[in-house]
Image (tube, grey):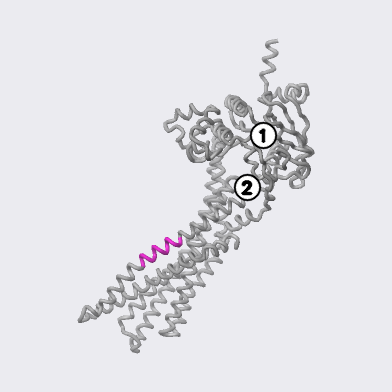
């Protein structure tokens, strides 16, 4: 917990102290406003002979009334300013802790997990300051100051009021914390899981629709949501009971203060015009004490968010990359006797091959063969247990500017909720509008974009919902062209596309990447004839390698190729 709270408090301690001081001053302004108002009302009721006798209280009422509003505004302004600064820095720290781990074998988070941490958990932590730290410190400060101030009038009465206020400041918050601890944890965990589930569902909404199981998802989601709503209702019932008891304590404080003030008046300690003043001053103080129970009861829900953040920052980070490629215009990729194990499982074993500049290589293999692991090794996210993956003789996992030389086209490239122009420009942030349009023309998307009412300024919506799967891949391909990396990794970019769209996209890919080195990872053998060489990976071993035409003489390869081209043989037989 200390790594995600205390360092930020220490860094912004001055602003935090200013915010707390303004919070105390706000309550004091409200208290003195009611104190002088009570005195003014009582004094006016005596029908003073001269207006000057109530002139000072009138001015004081106006001063404290205006001052309370001004100080309250400043307190909110400073408090929210410091919290927003903390959150901005915290989001960067979370991203920097998470980003190096994305390609590692131990990183198991889904998109919903990542978004849940970056959005829900980090956002949740602002409540630590706004709903717990600020109110608790302000309330505690007011408690101590009020008891000390009353001690100057009557120590026994100050002790009595300390007991009353102590019930509001210490006892009820502790009871709330103990009573709602497990309930709060379950509610926070449940909401986080709902957030993850909904996020993943939105990202894969097409799969739910195509499978016809959207009603199944909605029913499951509503069941989980009903459980959380039930817990929330239980918490609300407890809160209503606790708040009723707290109001009874405030009532006891009012009655005790009224009796004490009346007694002091009868003894001649002060004027009877101060009775209402002392009673009314309780209400602003009670207003500061009552929210403390809710503030403290939120602590368990913060712990759940903090635990997830600790899990992210506590994971083993990859070693820093200390080498830099001097020339990335042409890269020679070599995989030399690479073996890799994960969780005692042999994923890759003695794999060796090389890709010359401009060469096109297809990497085939069934699911679980180790293709994705090999791609992560080339990206430098993993370090081989044996052997080496090198670019121009430098180990990939040591290269700091690897992204300048290696670009990746994934199965589902992310499209942001912004314009087409901005999405393409992510490949090179300094690209001009002309260069963006050039890239779109290369991937055969320019004419379609220009047919849209807003052209390149068309908003693609979240995940590129306005475009088809093939069009989203073309936008990602345009990014790669702007990036101009000499080596391109294609991680099954046509998965989920219909055969016509797949054929058109692959034709475009091989045309626009003609001068690049390409490693194309795929399950099936369609379009492998467009590559210079084919590698076949099975159970972590390289079992076949060679040109497509030569491998056709291999019986197994020929059978696999025939399965992906069922009509080709029939056509040839019909012609013959």
Q: Which residues are magenta?
A: 68-79
Q: How dense is the environment of label 2, judged by Cα within 10 Å: few (below 14), some, or many (20 and up)?
A: few
**Mark 1: secondary structure:** loop
Q: Position of residue 93 (x, y in %)?
A: 58, 54
Question: Can residue 448 be seen from the camera position used here?
Answer: yes
Question: Can residue 242 be seen from the camera position used here?
Answer: no
Is residue 119 found left or right of 342 in the rendered image?
A: left
Residue 273 image-quadrant placement = bottom left
Residue ID for mark 1: 330
455 above or below 296? Answer: above
Residue 157 image-quadrant placement = bottom left
Q: Nearer the viewer, residue 103 or 327?
A: 327
Q: Position of residue 2 (x, y in %)?
A: 60, 63
Q: Viewer-nearest of labels 1 and 2? A: 1
Q: Position of residue 464 (x, y in %)?
A: 51, 37
Q: Residue furthest front?
A: 326
Identified at 47% across, 66% down, the residue is 135
Q: Nearer the viewer, residue 38 or 450?
A: 450
Is residue 45 found left or right of 315 in the rendered image?
A: left
Q: Position of residue 518 (x, y in %)?
A: 66, 31
């Amino acid at each position: 917990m200390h790594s995600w709270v205390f360092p930020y408090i220490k860094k912004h301690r001055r602003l935090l102290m200013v915010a707390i001081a303004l919070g105390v001053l706000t309550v004091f302004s409200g208290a003195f406003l009611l104190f002088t108002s009570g005195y003014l009302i009582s004094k006016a009721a005596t029908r003073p002979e001269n207006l000057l006798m109530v002139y000072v209280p009138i001015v004081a009422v106006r001063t404290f009334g205006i001052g309370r509003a001004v100080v309250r505004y400043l307190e909110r302004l400073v408090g929210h300013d410091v919290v927003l600064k903390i959150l901005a820095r915290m989001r960067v720290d979370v991203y920097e802790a998470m980003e190096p781990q994305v390609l590692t074998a131990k990183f198991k988070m889904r998109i919903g997990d990542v978004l849940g941490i970056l959005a829900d958990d980090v956002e949740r932590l602002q409540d630590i300051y706004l709903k717990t730290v600020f109110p608790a410190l302000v309330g505690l400060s007011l408690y101590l100051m009020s008891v000390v101030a009353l001690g100057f009038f009557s120590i026994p009465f100050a002790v009595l009021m300390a007991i009353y206020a102590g019930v509001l400041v210490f006892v009820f918050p502790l009871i709330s914390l103990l009573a709602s601890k497990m309930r709060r944890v379950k509610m926070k965990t449940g909401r986080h899981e709902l957030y993850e589930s909904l996020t993943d569902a939105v990202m894969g909404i097409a799969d739910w629709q195509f499978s016809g199981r959207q009603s199944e998802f909605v029913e499951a989601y509503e069941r989980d949501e009903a459980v959380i709503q039930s817990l929330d209702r239980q918490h609300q019932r407890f809160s209503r009971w606790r708040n009723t008891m707290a109001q009874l304590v405030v009532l006891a404080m009012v009655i005790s203060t009224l009796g004490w003030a009346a007694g002091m008046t009868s003894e001649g300690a002060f004027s009877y015009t101060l009775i209402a003043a002392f009673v009314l001053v309780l209400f602003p103080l009670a207003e500061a004490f009552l929210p403390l129970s809710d503030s403290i009861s939120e602590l368990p829900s913060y712990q759940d968010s903090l635990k997830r953040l600790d899990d992210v920052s506590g994971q083993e980070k990859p070693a820093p990359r200390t080498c830099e490629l001097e020339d990335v215009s042409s890269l020679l990729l070599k995989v030399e006797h690479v073996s890799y194990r994960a969780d005692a499982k042999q994923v890759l074993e003695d794999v060796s091959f090389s890709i010359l500049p401009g060469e096109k290589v297809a990497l085939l293999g069934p699911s679980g063969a180790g293709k994705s692991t090999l791609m992560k090794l080339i990206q430098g996210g993993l370090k081989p247990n044996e052997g080496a993956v090198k670019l121009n003789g430098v180990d990939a996992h040591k290269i700091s500017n690897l992204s300048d030389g290696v670009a990746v086209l994934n199965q589902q490239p992310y499209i942001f909720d912004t314009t087409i122009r901005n999405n393409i420009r992510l490949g090179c942030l300094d690209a001009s509008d002309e260069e963006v349009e050039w890239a779109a023309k290369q991937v055969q998307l320019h004419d379609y974009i220009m047919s849209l009412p807003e052209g390149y300024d068309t908003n693609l919506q979240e995940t590129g919902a306005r475009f088809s799967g093939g069009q989203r891949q073309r936008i990602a391909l345009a990014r790669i062209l702007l990036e101009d990396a000499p080596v391109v990794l294609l991680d099954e970019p046509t998965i989920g596309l219909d055969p016509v769209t797949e054929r058109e996209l692959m034709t475009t890919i091989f045309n626009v990447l003609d001068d690049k080195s390409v490693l194309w990872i795929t399950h099936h053998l369609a379009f492998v004839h467009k590559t210079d060489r084919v590698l076949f990976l099975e159970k972590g071993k390289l079992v076949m390698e060679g040109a497509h035409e030569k491998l056709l003489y291999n019986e197994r390869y020929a059978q696999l190729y025939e399965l992906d081209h069922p009509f080709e043989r029939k056509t040839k037989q019909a012609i013959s």
